[in-house]
Image (tube, rainbow, N blue to C red):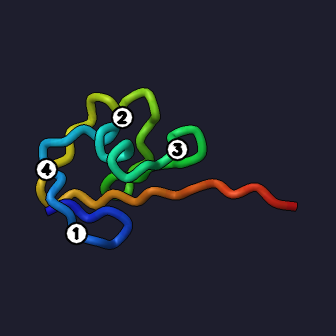
Amino acid sequence: MVFLNGKEYELENMTLAAVLDVFKFDVRTIAVELNEEIIPKSTYNHTILKDGDIVEVVSFVGGG
């Protein structure tokens, strides 16, 4: 199981990029933390999720 924003999913062996696509995240407006480390966008395509990983996706919202 992989935890994505606090919920459990069967996402093992998927790339981070594939998961973000499946869940329709706009990679231009998010930051991703994997196991308490910020992940650079340039590594999304080759970051493979493993059992027990904790992924947090934070969306940026404009305002003012």
CA separation in Å, label 1 and label 3: 21 Å
Q: Identify residue for label 2.
A: 44
Please tell me in which quadrant of the rendered image residue 29 appears: top right
**Label 4 – label 2 distance at C-alpha:** 14 Å
Closer mark to the observer between disc 2 and disc 3: 3
| Mark 1 residue crowding within 10 angstroms, few (<14) / some (14–19) / many (20+) | few
Secondary structure category for the residue under label 1:
strand
Among numbered discs 4 and 2, the one appearing first in the sequence:
4
Upstream in the sequence, badge 3 or badge 4?
4
User: Residue drawn 52% across and 58% down?
Assistant: 58
- Give the number of callouts: 4
Q: Nearer the viewer, mark 1 or mark 3?
A: 3
Callout 3: few (<14), some (14-19), or many (20+) C-alpha neighbours within 10 Å?
few
- For disc 4, the marked residue is 12
Q: Work out how far the residue at label 1 is from the one at label 4, CA to CA, in angstroms.
A: 11 Å
Residue drawn at 26 percent across, 65 percent down:
3
Q: Which quarter of the rendered picture does the N terminus lie within?
A: bottom left
**Mark 4 Cα within 10 Å, few/some/many (few <14, many 20+)?**
some
Q: Name the kind of residue labelled 4 in the image.
A: Glu
Assign a secondary structure to mark 2: helix
Amino acid at the residue labelled 1: Glu
- The residue singled out by tag 1 in the image is 8
Residue identified by numbered label 3: 26
Rounded to the nearest whole Å, what is the CA distance between mark 2 and mark 1? 20 Å
Label 3 – label 4 distance at C-alpha: 21 Å
